[in-house]
Amino acid sequence: MATPPGRRYGQATTHETDSHMSNAKEMKTDDVLRVELEVFRAEHRDLDEAIHALEESGRADQLRLRRLKKQKLALKDKIARIEDKLTPDIIA
């Protein structure tokens, strides 16, 4: 099979590339979302443990604690958004 002029063997056309990229950007499969959810939950647990350890030490840097708590809250929001995507809407 001959390669069209101006195109190298194995190189996708602009239309093919755009189509694949838009599909990848538009949709995240449930499996990908579940993996992300587990990663975020693990990070959330780790932050919770770090915050608890700092508070228990009695000499925690308040600025650092605030930053960790803010990160933990941001992760909680991400987790909630992913859970919403994975939970089907039920029409009542």
Image: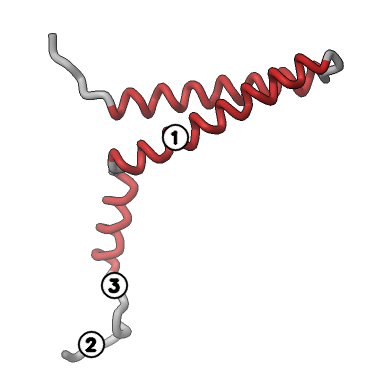
Q: What x and y, as percent, mark residue 7?
A: 30, 82
Residue bearing the label numbered 1: 38
Q: Residue at x 73, y 21 (%)?
A: 53
Q: What x and y, as percent, mark residue 2?
A: 19, 91
Name the amino acid, label 1. Glu
Name the amino acid, label 3. Ala
Which residue ends up furthest to the top in the rendered image? 92
Element marked by disc 1: helix
Front residue of 10/79: it is: 79
Which of the two discs, 1 and 3, labels the residue nearer the N terminus? 3
Residue bearing the label numbered 3: 12
Q: Residues within 10 Å of mark 3 (few under 14, many from 20)?
A: few
Front residue of 34/49: it is: 49
Q: Residue at x 59, y 23 (%)?
A: 72
Element marked by disc 3: loop
Vertical side of 7 occupied by 44: above or below: above
